[in-house]
Image (cartoon, rainbow, N blue to C red):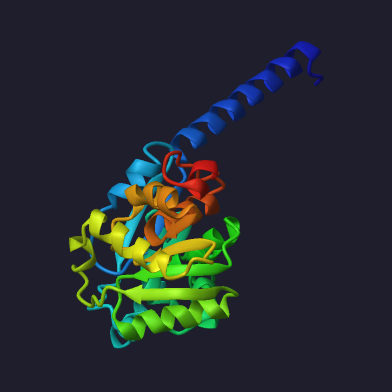
Amino acid sequence: MTTSRRELLKSASALVAGATLTGNVMRAAGTPTLGMIYPQKATIPPEASAMYPTGVKFLLESVDLPSMTPASYASVQDRIAPAALKLKSQGAQAIALMGTSLSFYRGAAYNQHLVDLIHGATGLPATTMSTAIVEGLRAVGGKRLAVSTAYNQEVTGLLKTFLEESGFEVLAIKGLGLEAMTDPGKVTQDYLQKFTFDIFEKAPKADAVFVSCGGLRTLEIIAPLEKETKVPVVSSLPHALWAGVRLLGLKGTAPGYGRLLSKG
């Protein structure tokens, strides 16, 4: 039995229409989804919806970090891969380990180990907040840094080591001395902006500023700090979100929040 040309064209049109419909349905159901491993139980941070109000879905799992100290960081390391797997099961297409000190406290090589651990466990693109910071600082051409942190002296020193291992020169660095997980959220933006600017003034040759700790509210002070210092500013949570959505194939642009986020 032979098939007429008209029948062949009809069948082909039906296949094309079906494929187009399937593709549209997949796109409609396939919102890019970033899974975030958080130090403590929390809701999706307001920075995520401020920067990316549409087009990205965020998921969150916690490792229940007790405090911002090296002993606490070590106590939760074996919870990271299971949290990543849980996020994958919920539909995450890329995973970011949030919590800067949670990933930098043992140095640059260990931070990369954590990226590899998450990717190896899930097969998904992965990053950490510390990796995101390095990428952000490099993207703005930062080499000589003025750094403010939320941490105690010991953890602040570990950050300095991590940054130096990552190829940066730390000209000035100071921490707020915080250890309790809830304390960074109590720091006002006005106080943090002044604290950071005072550190920058001690390092006039700095070509970038870095504010470290995902618990500090920094999104709204990036642009004002850049205006004060005349150099680019990178901070933990906003630039980790930037790096995370870029793993999803998006540009990561968030206009109005500093040089790097404005250009994506």
Q: Is residue 199 left or right of residue 203?
A: left
Q: Position of residue 34 (x, y in %)?
A: 43, 53
Q: Residue 52 lies in what quarter of the image?
A: top left
Q: In the rendered image, which quarter contains the C terminus?
A: top right
Q: Residue 178 lies in what quarter of the image?
A: bottom left
Using the rendered image of the protein, determine whether residue 93 is visible from the camera's viewpoint.
Answer: no
Front residue of this view, candidates 215 and 20: 215
Q: Is residue 247 above or below residue 255?
A: below
Tell me which residue sits at (49%, 32%) in the image: 25
Front residue of this view, candidates 37 and 2: 37
Q: In the rendered image, which quarter contains the N terminus?
A: top right
Q: Is residue 38 above or below residue 226?
A: below
> Which residue is outermost to the top?
6
Q: Is residue 62 left or right of residue 108?
A: left
Q: Position of residue 121 (x, y in %)?
A: 49, 71
Tell me which residue sits at (43%, 78%) in the image: 159
Tell me which residue sits at (53%, 29%) in the image: 24
Q: Position of residue 129 (x, y in %)?
A: 44, 65
Front residue of this view, candidates 188 and 59: 188
Tell me which residue sits at (33%, 55%) in the image: 218
